[in-house]
């Protein structure tokens, strides 16, 4: 009868290699369970590892966008607040101009009005020379010096900065001073010119000093209306930018959540399944150990 | 004619034969655990009979040969398998080391460093003259350089450690070939009688298998019974009772680790570095010169690509003025000075690599040297973030090909290129693991096959021992019977 021979050494070796193989499997499962990750090294799953790295990059980017959203938000809100203040000042000037447009004003009214106008101009300049964290926000790219001189001359440039607040979404975060102070005005003759609110205030003061009620009525009121309209427009642009930034922030958070979920699917371990596998591996190792010890006990020496 | 003395002789020869076979069995039992040992078998042959008038009378038995169970064919397969096993086991273990160099388990790998660096420009674009944000650019740039340098030095460390491992492997090869050659001489002197020198053959075969694990070899047994061995390139390393040593040839590269391997033949050295085939040495050289060097080259391409692209933009960008140092172009008053290079090589070699990438001294010395504006008007530079945005976008531009920095035909971003690199280290590990595991399985199968034929089963030997002991006892009875017969005859005389 044919039988294959088994050497004593073979019994030891095959049992030894089974035990080693199963121990190594058990250790691998143990590591995974401890780390709660199924993909730690690239060799655990090279393709999944690449995707996890892509998600890691995206998550870091989203963190940067979130930081930029906060920055954009604070810069835009500060701008919007000051533009609103300028708007209020110019509206007040218009009321004053309407009052002064009547022929019945006396000298005292006139002096008071001029003082008020000078104060208003000063206020507007100070609103537009607002600093945020030490940087002037209405000077265009010139952030380290005041945007307006005391006489209302604009010292900055006409540049607006864009900021990336979401993947490839750039939003304007500052308004050059001239965006607020300069406006287009079409006069009664239909001629359109670009005027500055500073010049309008200066002219209004001159009109008052000259008691030129006609000029106030026929020219300044109209000019002030155009100014108010223009500032109100800039203010609403700032307001809508604030809302867009807030929306981007929400979108970023949503993408972040999705990315985290994708990453978790790729790398996190299903602990329940892993524990079941661990138990199965443990049982297999126990069985091998038991049969090994039985096999090694068997020798003819026990009987001879 | 048969007589009492010849009966005694039959008893004697049988006793001697059984003693021999018991000693062979004992030898088997005592070597049951000896690696490479083949079970030996004593061959009984009936002695030539004596011719009498009545016919031929048997003359007992003797042992004519002690042979070992032949496993030559399996041995040859094992030699080939050992080279594969040596190659893939070593490749696997080195690939694991390479993989760990690229591990992000610490949370700070090159990918994080690159992402943080480019994102620092995205952050800086919010307020380009914010010192804290500029500091963040410089800090992340330094960390990125540091990570590149660290990765390169860790890969270099693997290459140099491979080299010292090569040295010990070559010493081992020389030790083995010396022993194999001297066994050739011993075996020849023993086998001239026509009997196989079983134990020495076993020993030599084991040495050859051990040698094959280290270096890919071909073996050839000549008519004199000498086992001659040559390496994969065909150079002989064992010829009869002499052997040719292997030696490391001097390194030629700057880091001093690319030593070649040569066979010493008399006064000349034959270089076999490019023709090593499998075995541990083949794996060591291949990993050192191809795999690890390949990853170092990839990191060099990446570091150099990032440095070059950032430098191009930075050179065209202008520096800020404002609250810190005013960098006015001395030849062009009122104009901002161009940024110059951002990255440089720390060793002055003129080529930026992973090992030497560092930031320009101007930036180390002053944060205002970080140029992110486009405006040339010195008054307008401080709030200009346009080049900060351009710099941040470099991260998402495809400057790399599958293999190198190739801005004209690039189809991968810096990070995709890096991710592919990391992924490749994982594939290497898996690939070598699968092949090492196949080779291990085959090795176990071949060992098992060899054990089936030539291994010692102690139980089997114990039964044999008992059997031959009984036979020995029976043979003693023959002598006792002859003795009694002789006594009877002597008693007749008295």
Image (cartoon, coloured by chain):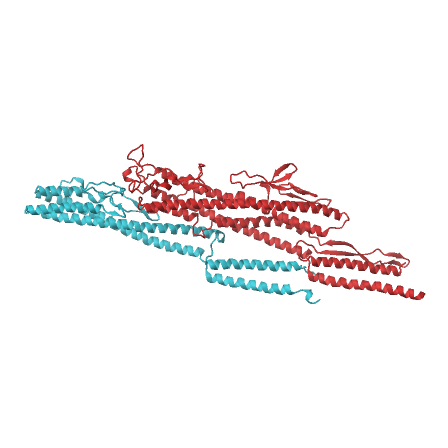
Chain colours: A cyan, B red
The residue under the point 16% across, 39% down is A191
User: For this rendering, which residue is in front, B149 or B93?
Assistant: B149
Question: Is the C terminus of chain B in the top left, top right, bottom left or bottom right quadrant?
Answer: bottom right
Is residue B42 depicted above or below B245 in this figure? below
Considering every residue shown, the one lying at the far right of the view is: B493
Q: Is residue A230 visible?
A: no
**In the figure, residue B449 lies in which quadrant?**
bottom right
Where is residue B54 shown, x and y percent of the image?
Answer: 90, 59
The residue under the point 94% across, 65% down is B493
Q: How many marks?
A: 0
**In the figure, residue B10 lies in which quadrant?**
bottom right
The residue under the point 64% across, 56% down is B448
User: For this rendering, which residue is in front, B39 or B153?
Assistant: B153
Where is residue B447 shown, x and y percent of the image?
Answer: 64, 54
Is residue B26 depicted above or below B217 in this figure? below
Report the side of B154 relative to B312 (left or right): right
Where is residue B213 shown, x and y percent of the image?
Answer: 61, 48
Where is residue A200 shown, x and y percent of the image?
Answer: 15, 42
Question: Is the N terminus of chain B in the top left, top right, bottom left or bottom right quadrant?
Answer: bottom right
Q: Can residue B285 be seen in this view?
A: yes
Considering every residue shown, the one lying at the far bottom of the view is: A303
Considering every residue shown, the one lying at the far front of the view is: B365
Report the side of B410 relative to A115 (left or right): right
Report the side of A219 relative to B436 (left or right): left
């Amino acid at each position: 009868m044919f039988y294959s021979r088994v050497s004593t050494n073979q019994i030891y070796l095959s049992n030894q290699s089974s035990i080693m193989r199963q121990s190594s499997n058990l250790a691998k499962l143990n590591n995974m369970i401890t780390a709660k990750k199924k993909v730690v090294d690239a060799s655990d799953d090279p393709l999944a590892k690449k995707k996890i790295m892509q998600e890691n990059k995206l998550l870091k980017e989203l963190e940067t966008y979130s930081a930029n959203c906060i920055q954009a938000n604070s810069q835009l809100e500060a701008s919007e607040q000051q533009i609103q203040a300028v708007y209020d000042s110019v509206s007040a000037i218009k009321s004053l101009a309407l009052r002064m447009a009547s022929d019945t004003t006396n000298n005292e009214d006139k002096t008071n009005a001029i003082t008020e106008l000078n104060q208003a101009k000063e206020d507007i300049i100070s609103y537009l020379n607002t600093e945020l964290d030490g940087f002037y926000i209405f000077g265009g790219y010139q952030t380290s010096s005041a945007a307006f001189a005391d006489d209302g001359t604009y010292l900055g440039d006409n540049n607006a900065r864009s900021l990336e607040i979401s993947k490839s979404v750039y939003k304007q975060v500052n308004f050059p001073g001239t965006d607020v102070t300069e406006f287009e005005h079409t006069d009664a003759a239909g001629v359109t010119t670009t005027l500055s609110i500073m010049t309008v205030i200066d002219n209004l003061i001159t009109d008052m000093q000259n008691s030129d009620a006609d000029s106030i009525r026929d020219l300044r009121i109209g000019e002030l209306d155009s100014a108010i309209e223009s500032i109100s427009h800039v203010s609403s642009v700032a307001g809508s930018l604030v809302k867009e930034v807030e929306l981007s922030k929400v979108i970023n958070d949503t993408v972040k959540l999705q990315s985290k979920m994708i990453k978790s699917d790729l790398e996190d371990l299903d602990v329940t399944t892993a524990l079941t596998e661990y138990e199965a591996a443990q049982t297999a190792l126990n069985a091998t150990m038991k049969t090994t010890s039985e096999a090694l006990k068997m020798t003819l020496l026990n009987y001879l | 004619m048969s007589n009492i003395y010849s009966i005694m002789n039959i008893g004697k020869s049988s006793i001697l034969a059984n003693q021999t076979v018991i000693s062979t069995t004992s030898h088997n039992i005592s070597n049951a655990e000896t690696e490479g040992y083949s079970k030996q078998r004593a061959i009984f042959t009936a002695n030539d009979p004596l011719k009498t008038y009545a016919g031929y009378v048997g003359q007992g038995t003797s042992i004519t040969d002690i042979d070992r169970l032949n496993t030559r064919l399996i041995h040859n397969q094992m030699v080939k398998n050992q080279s594969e096993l040596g190659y893939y086991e070593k490749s696997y273990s080195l690939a694991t080391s390479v993989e760990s160099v690229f591990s992000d388990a610490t949370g700070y790998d090159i990918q994080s460093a690159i992402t943080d660096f480019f994102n620092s420009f995205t952050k800086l674009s919010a307020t380009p003259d914010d010192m804290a944000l500029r500091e963040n650019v410089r800090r992340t740039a330094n960390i990125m350089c540091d990570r590149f340098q660290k990765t390169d030095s860790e890969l270099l460390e693997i290459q140099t450690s491979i080299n010292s491992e090569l040295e010990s492997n070559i010493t081992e090869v020389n030790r083995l070939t010396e022993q194999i050659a001297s066994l050739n001489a011993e075996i020849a002197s023993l086998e001239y009688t026509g009997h196989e020198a079983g134990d020495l053959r076993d020993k030599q075969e084991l040495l050859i298998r051990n040698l094959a694990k280290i270096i890919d070899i071909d073996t050839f047994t000549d008519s004199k019974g000498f086992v001659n061995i040559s390496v994969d390139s065909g150079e002989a390393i064992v010829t009869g009772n002499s052997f040719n040593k292997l030696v490391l040839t001097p390194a030629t590269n700057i880091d001093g680790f690319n030593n070649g391997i040569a066979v010493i033949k008399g006064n000349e050295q034959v270089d076999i570095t490019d023709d090593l085939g499998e075995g541990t040495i083949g794996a060591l050289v291949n990993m050192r010169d191809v795999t690890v060097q390949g990853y170092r080259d990839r990191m060099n391409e990446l570091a150099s690509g990032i440095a070059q692209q950032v430098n191009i933009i930075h050179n065209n960008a202008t520096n800020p003025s404002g609250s810190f140092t005013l960098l006015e172009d001395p030849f062009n008053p009122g104009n901002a000075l161009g940024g110059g290079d951002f990255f440089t090589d720390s060793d002055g070699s003129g080529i930026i690599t992973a090992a030497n990438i560092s930031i320009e001294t101007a930036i180390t010395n002053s944060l205002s040297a970080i140029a992110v504006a486009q405006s040339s008007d010195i008054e307008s530079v401080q709030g200009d973030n346009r080049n900060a945005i351009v710099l941040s976008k470099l991260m998402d531009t495809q400057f790399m090909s599958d293999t190198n920095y190739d801005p004209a035909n690039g189809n991968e971003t810096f990070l995709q290129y890096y991710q592919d690199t990391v992924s490749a280290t994982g594939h290497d590990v898996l690939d070598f693991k699968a092949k090492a595991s196949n080779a291990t399985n085959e090795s176990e199968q071949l060992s098992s096959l060899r054990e089936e034929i030539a291994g010692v089963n102690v139980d089997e030997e114990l039964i044999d021992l008992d059997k031959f002991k009984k036979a020995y006892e029976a043979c003693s009875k023959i002598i006792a019977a002859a003795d009694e017969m002789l006594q009877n005859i002597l008693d007749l005389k008295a």
